[in-house]
Amino acid sequence: MSSQSALSGHLSISTDGTSKRLHQGSTDSSPNLIVETNSLSLDDLKSRFLDPSLLTFTTNAHDGTVQSYNIELFKSSSLPADVFDSCFDLLEANMSVAYKATTRGWNPRKKKEEMKHPAMRYLVLTVVSGDNQPQGSSFVGFLEFMITEEEGSEVIYTYELDILPAYQKLGLGKRLLDVAEEFGRRVGVEKAMLTVFESNKGARRFYEREGYDLDEISPEPKVLRNGTIKPPTYHILSKAFWADETGDEEDEEEDEED
Ligand SMILES: CC(C)(COP(=O)(O)OP(=O)(O)OC[C@H]1O[C@@H](n2cnc3c(N)ncnc32)[C@H](O)[C@@H]1OP(=O)(O)O)[C@@H](O)C(=O)NCCC(=O)NCCS
């Protein structure tokens, strides 16, 4: 999984999650959803935008044993240092090779800087220890997201989604994505967005199963002089939240014209 900023030059995001463009170009005097959401306390974010029924659950491990999981929301500023390190280490283990294959490469310092952006939010997944294990819970994966603006749209942008290899293909990535999408719906943004490397075919298939399609701003393939088609090194995918309502409105307008 790659990040919005690393690949689409979105480092102009201000500390409240809006882009420079929005600050400079917006003449809208209505309250800004992004600024308002990103200024809320962690407790407000949890009570207003998390669906509690999705946060604790059990599922069968690959060996058939039942395991209990928990998902917790953090702001970048409230993420404990050891959890930050677990997130970064897992990201590096899962994705640094894919990053290195792109023109921007893998830059740990810049990635950490991006991960500490004040508007960055984390959903951290832990597995709760069973009776015959030491008390507590251990880190299994995370989803890093931001409520932000992309090409004039208010969106929830997933920057990273990573699950420990031993815990993949158990439905856990889908669960983190479900929690983030519900968060975005409750905030009231238009759509969920993310970036996926061309080389990461498995992840792309996973997102397509979850309802994501190529976004209109995703880079186009290049046609070389000899006619060869060269795919872009990454794709921007999105999932609209309010597609039905928009469709209905269009139908109604067409009906009125008739
Ligand atoms: C991509 C990733 C986040 C998906 O998370 P995950 O927890 O493995 O995903 P899920 O288990 O929810 O679904 C993955 C697949 O397992 C299947 N699956 C889900 N539950 C399953 C189960 N109990 N048994 C067998 N298969 C299962 C799903 O059908 C899905 O199939 P698909 O790959 O054909 O779409 C994870 O594999 C990962 O961390 N990969 C490395 C990092 C990465 O590529 N991140 C994304 C960058 S854009």
Image (cartoon, helix red, strand yellow):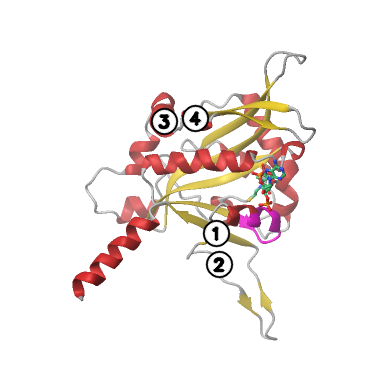
Whole-Å distance between the Cαs marked 3 and 2?
Answer: 33 Å
Name the front one of labels 4 and 3.
4
For image coordinates 76% across by 16% down, the residue present is: 133
Q: Which mark is residue 236?
A: 1
Q: Quadrant of the C terminus?
A: bottom left
The amino acid beneath tag 3 is Leu
Q: Which residue is mark 2?
A: 219
Q: Please check the rendered image and state whether residue 204 is part of the magenta-colored stretch, yes or no.
A: yes
For image coordinates 57% across by 39% down, the residue present is: 176
First in sequence, mark 1 or 2: give its number: 2
Crowd rating for badge 3 (residues with CA inside 10 Å; few <14, some 14–19, many 20+) = some
For image coordinates 48% across by 44% down, the residue present is: 181
Q: Are marks 1 and 2 in contact (CB under 8 Å)?
A: yes
Whole-Å distance between the Cαs marked 1 and 2?
Answer: 8 Å
Name the front one of labels 1 and 4.
4
Label 2 element class: loop
> Which of the 4 image quarters holds residue 34?
top left
Label 1 element class: strand
Q: Which residue is mark 3?
A: 45
